[in-house]
Structure formats: C-alpha cells, structure tokens
Image: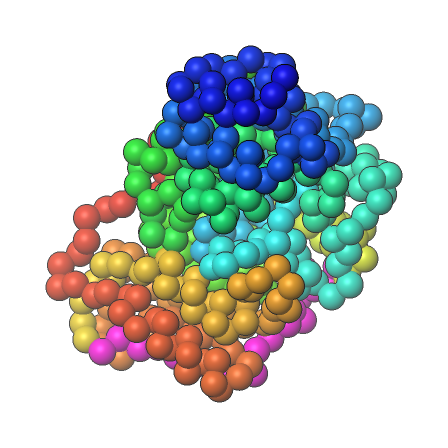
Amino acid sequence: MRMVDIIAKKRDGGELTTEEIQFLVTGYTDGTIPDYQMSAWAMAVFFRGMTPRETGDLTMAMAGSGEQLDLSSLSGIKVDKHSTGGVGDKTTLVVAPLVAAAGIPVAKMSGRGLGYSGGTIDKLESFAGFAVERSREQFLQQVRDIGVSVIGQSGNLTPADKKLYALRDVTATVEAVPLIASSIMSKKIAAGADAILLDVKVGKGAFMKSIEEAEVLAKAMVDIGTQVGRKTVAVISDMNQPLGFAVGNALEVKEAIDTLAGKGPRDLTELALAIGSRMLVLGGLVEDEQSGRAKLEEIMASGKAVEKLAQMVEAQGGDKSDVYETSRLPKAAIIHELVASEDGYVAQIDAEAVGHASVVLGAGRLTKEMAIDLAVGMVLHKKRGDQVKAGDILMTIHANKEELLASALQELEGAIVLSTKPPVDQPLIYKIIG
Ligand code: URA
C-alpha cells in the first residue's frame, strides 16, 4: 500500500477502505508516513469529507494507536461526558460527583484549559494538594472505593490524534467535521467509555459559532458512536454568554459546590440536570430522563452530592474541609466592581470577551507551558435578560495585579451590552441528538 495512492483516492472523492485507514494511522503514528503526506490527506478530507464508515474506522484506528484504558474491572456501564469547551463551563465538576452519588461509576480523564476556555483539571487544582496524576491502579481503585475519580489525561492516549491535531492546527485543516468528530470520539473510546454524553457548545464563546455547524458535528459524533457500538447522546447547549456566574478556577469550584448543594445558578443547575439525567439513562440506572432528574434533585437536596465531591477531594490528596468551607479556596487580593452606567436590560454578555479577559488576569493560558493563577477571574452579577439600574454591579473582577486588571478591563469594554427592551429569550439547550 502506498500513501500517495490513498491521498489521490481521497482527492478524487473515493471512499477509503478500513485497511487503508489503518495503514495511514499506523504509518503516521510510527513516523513512516511524513507530515507532508498527512497534511495533503487532511486537506483532501477537508474538501471531500468522509463517509460515516470511514469516520468510524478513523476513530477506532486512532483510539487503538496508543494506550487504552480497560475499565472492565469496574462494574456497571461506564458513561463518559465530554464538553467541546466554553467559558465558565464547570459542568463536569458538578456532574461527576452528582452521577457518582446516584450510582454510576465515574472514571474520568479531563483536560487543562487552553486559550479562553477553561479545563476541569486546572479547576480541581484549586483544592490544595489535589493530585491529578494517579497510577492506573490508584485511579481504578478509587472508583471501586468511592465511585468517582477525575484525573488528567494519560500521556500516551491516542498519540495519532495528538500528532494529527498539531498538524491540522498549522495546515488550516482543523475545521473538518470528520476530523474533529473522530479526534474527540477516539479519546473517549481510548479512555474506556461504554457510553458517551457529549455537550456540544454553540455561540460566541464556543468553537462552533452556529447551531447548524454544531448540529452537523453532534450528528457526526453520534453516528460514530452508533457505528462503533457506544451509545452516544449529544446535547447542543448555549455558549453565547458564560455558563453560570463565575469564570476562573477557584471561583468556578465554589460555584460548582453551591450547585451540588442545590443552590447554584439556574442555567448551570439546569444543564447539569439535563446532562446528568441522560447519563443515568445511558448507564441503565433509570428508564427515562424525568426519573433521572428527580433522583439527582433528591441527591442534591440531601447533601450527598457535596459529600461525594468531598470524598473525591480527600481521596486525591486534598482536604475535604475546602469543600465545606469554600473561604479556604485561593482568593485574589483585588476585587474590582464593574457597574452599569444606565438603566436597561442585559442584552448580551460576550462569552469570548469574558474568556479573554480571564486569560489576561491569569486564569487561563495562551501556551501549554504557562502557569496560571487559580484565584483570579470574574463573577457576573447579572445575566442576559436581567433588568438593571444605573449603579448596579454587573460583574466583580478578582485580580492579583493592578496592571493585569487594567488590561482585563480593556478586554471587557463593550462585552456587556444593555438595551432599553428585554432581549428575546435564548434557550440554554437547543437540541438533543441521539
Ligand atoms: N477538540 C478535539 O479534541 N479535537 C478537535 O479536532 C477539535 C476540538
């Protein structure tokens, strides 16, 4: 088999065989296929696309390109959750302990933040001493003992995707749906998922800017799941404004704990219940979403959800008092209030601008190596549709350096738009696929 023939076949609109896809993934991973041939192939896919069968084959070949996690020693259906990323998206911090408290085993690998969208692993490090690197045995044992563990992604998971993603980034081939879908799904499958719940974000603060684009990606991922025997459901949710009120690592942890106690923001609570209840259905614990939701609401109200997070923090080397006394979490030195200059309604809170401002404050990183400040970020006091009076606080900014606060304020200029009339309602969840 020759890579040049595979490139030509795809360039001319042909459908690659399973063997051809396996050949190119293996060859690219071991270095026998060079970057320039892989780039040409990725560009051919960008223009010609892939059939669902080809996309499924690419996913499984990438999933098999490195280490794979075997979760079969854990009883029950292992349901994983993945978000395509957004601003203030702390849903995993809520959903993981919540569904674990309901009886679904959660053995989850999560990522760090990059650019303006945050990452669960960074957020968890707000708990002093919390270990995100665990041996495979420690990780599985913790799930057997307490039902939940969230750790960083193992270095040798899907090396083919790691290489191909870096190549796509510099060859203008990131935005190809079969490549995005197989990239995400290969990581979930290598991480041992039996069933997968995808939260596809759409809007100003997301990778997918239109509902149509988000739907195409969601369908492609659900198709892959179906092809390869993993039940997959995708929720398409709004990311035009930040999720919840808090943006920034420790601030988001505090908000997640409030939500686990049933006292969180409406949108975050609703999304966590929508996702969590569907995970209970996928895990075979309940018949339908309504029963799942009722169960999860009961768990929140009983204090068991907060307790499950505290158990996880303790098991991974942190102090569970941090969960019950959130004043112990990292705190910023400077609190700056942004106030409304006129009466009106909040018509828009630009999630992307808020995300960029949080990076400027130090909450996120622009390169993988950058250190972050866990304490900084912002807390919104108003959300889209809320009525405000001149002088009302719109947002508090938590900073540790005056000069970074000044730069963040520049980023935030024009981010919150007021109108004289209430804006039309925007749904939190646009569609459920699968
Ligand atoms: N996230 C991924 O993991 N892969 C992509 O290709 C795009 C977003």
Q: Position of residue 308 (x, y in %)?
A: 70, 46
Q: Is residue 72 above or below residue 270?
A: above
- Residue 271 seen from this side: no
Residue drawn at (62%, 49%) of the image: 111
Q: Residue at x 64, y 72 (%)?
A: 330
Front-most of residues 354 and 282: 354
Q: Position of residue 400 (x, y in %)?
A: 55, 81
Residue 33, picture quadrant? top right
Q: Nearer the viewer, residue 260 or 275?
A: 275
Horizontal side of 391 relative to 10 (left or right) equals left
**Which part of the image, by quadrant, shows the C terminus?**
top left
* Quarter of the N terminus within the rendering: top right
The residue sitting at 47% across, 59% down in the picture is 116
Up/down of 396 relative to 355, above or below = below
Q: Is residue 211 visible?
A: yes
Is residue 281 located in the magenta-colored stretch of the structure? no
In the figure, is residue 95 to the left or right of 44?
right
Task: Give the side of residue 401 with respect to residue 101, left or right.
Answer: left
Front residue of this view, candidates 193 and 245 = 193
- Is residue 326 rendered magenta in the image? yes
Q: Residue furthest bottom?
A: 402
Q: Quadrant of residue 219?
A: top left
Q: What's the magenta region?
A: 320-341
